[in-house]
Image: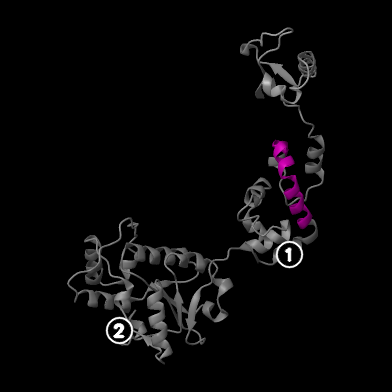
């Protein structure tokens, strides 16, 4: 119920006589469209009217909607929620029926994966319906999830440079752009190895974005990069955030690939940092929750030195290395 004042109730009858206003209110009371708020008191006129009223909602007949849900909706759509909330079905009905129409006429298209926006437009003729509008809520009300629509998300495309497409090969994922460009230049100069390890492809990870980008790996890279014999290495800043990115990256995709730290690059970072009088301070607010997986790939002495740097609130940026460093440490891959 909604409370309304007598003045609001008579707003559209303000130009007629009080006697006509009185009879208008009496008609509404007789039709049970309004109910007086007796505690509001009377208006002091003759005949008197209460100063406030409850506007009574009319009970709606949802029987036709109930019949539609029970007997006319595609069986892939669960109608349980809407049968319990028929007023919500009335609100969402346009979109539920579009989904119903799609399943009846085009369900075979679900066998083919599509991007979220493509599927959204295919079903509702609104490409952002599943990402920015009420599409996910309506799917949930229908007992469906995004996986039922066979869709994939689209992250920013991976930036990568391929020196060769021969397989198996080593792929190196880099946290920062400067190092990606420097190592790419190194390979473009005709070099095949970085720190003694042959590298076939460089991938720019863009920090934490690598987690999202690799989720769409199968859709945005060339087939040779997915060969099971390939090895994937990761190299980033030597700070809590960089280590955390590696550990989350390796953990998120461990069922598909073993992702290893690019050990010789980190070793060179430690060597060069050891020659410096000071290191930059760690940025405030970094998430320091790391598991220790990263350190397990290094010797006890190397891990201890890394932890000592981190504990002193210092870090080593990936950019400590440059083009002049990459040909050093002619180390064989099997040493990893």
Which residue sits furthest bottom? 190
Horizontal side of 269 relative to 74 (left or right) equals left
Q: Tell me the residue that label 2 is attached to.
A: 325
- From the top left corner, tell me how far across and down residue 277 is, in percent: 17, 72
Look at the image and give the residue range highlighted in magenta. Answer: 83-103
Quarter location, residue 280? bottom left
Quarter of the image for the C terminus: give it. bottom left
The residue positioned 51% from the left and 77% from the top of the image is 228
- From the top left corner, tell me how far across and down residue 231 is, in percent: 44, 78
Quarter location, residue 20? top right
Magenta run includes residue 95: yes
The circle drawn on residue 109 is 1
Looking at the image, is 321 positioned above or below residue 54?
below
- From the top left corner, tell me how far across and down residue 51 is, in percent: 66, 15
Number of residues whose C-alpha sits closer than 10 Å to that of mark 2, classed few (under 14), some (14–19) or many (20 or more)? some
Quarter location, residue 293? bottom left
- From the top left corner, tell me how far across and down residue 158 is, in percent: 51, 73
Which residue sits furthest left? 277
**SS class, disc 2:** helix
Residue 254 visible in the displayed image: no
Sequence-earlier tag: 1 or 2: 1
Residue 8 visible in the displayed image: yes
Looking at the image, is 295 positioned above or below residue 172?
above
**SS class, disc 1:** helix
Q: CA distance from mark 1 to mark 2?
A: 52 Å
Quarter of the image for the N terminus: give it. top right
């Amino acid at each position: 119920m909604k409370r309304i004042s007598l003045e609001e109730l008579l707003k559209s009858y303000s130009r007629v006589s009080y006697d006509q206003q009185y009879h208008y209110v009496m008609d509404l009371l007789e039709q049970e469209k309004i109910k007086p708020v007796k505690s509001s008191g009377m208006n002091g006129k003759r005949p008197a009217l209460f100063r406030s009223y409850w506007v009574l909602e009319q009970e709606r007949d949802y029987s036709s909607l109930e019949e539609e849900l029970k007997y006319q909706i595609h069986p892939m759509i669960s109608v349980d929620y809407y049968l319990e909330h028929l007023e919500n079905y009335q609100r969402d009905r346009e979109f539920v029926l579009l989904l119903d129409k799609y399943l009846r006429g085009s369900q075979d298209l679900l066998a083919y994966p599509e991007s979220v926006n493509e599927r959204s437009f295919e079903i509702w003729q609104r490409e952002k319906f599943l990402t920015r509008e009420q599409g996910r809520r309506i799917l949930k009300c229908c007992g469906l999830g995004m996986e039922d629509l066979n869709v994939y998300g689209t992250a920013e495309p991976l930036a990568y440079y391929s020196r060769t497409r021969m397989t198996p090969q080593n792929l190196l994922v880099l946290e920062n752009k400067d190092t990606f460009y420097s190592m790419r230049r190194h390979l473009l100069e005709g070099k095949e190895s970085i720190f003694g390890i042959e590298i076939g492809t460089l991938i720019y990870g863009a920090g934490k974005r690598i987690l999202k980008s690799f989720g769409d790996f199968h859709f945005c890279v060339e087939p040779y990069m997915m060969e099971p014999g390939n090895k994937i290495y990761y190299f980033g800043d030597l700070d809590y955030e960089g280590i955390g990115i590696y550990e989350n990256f390796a953990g998120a995709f461990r069922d598909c690939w073993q992702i290893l730290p690019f050990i010789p690059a980190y070793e060179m970072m430690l060597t060069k940092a050891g020659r410096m009088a000071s290191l930059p301070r760690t940025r405030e607010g970094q998430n320091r929750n790391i598991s220790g997986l990263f350190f397990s790939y290094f010797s006890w002495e190397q891990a201890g030195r890394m932890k000592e740097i981190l504990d002193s609130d210092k870090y080593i940026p990936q950019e400590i290395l440059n083009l002049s460093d990459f040909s050093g440490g002619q180390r064989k891959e099997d040493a990893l």
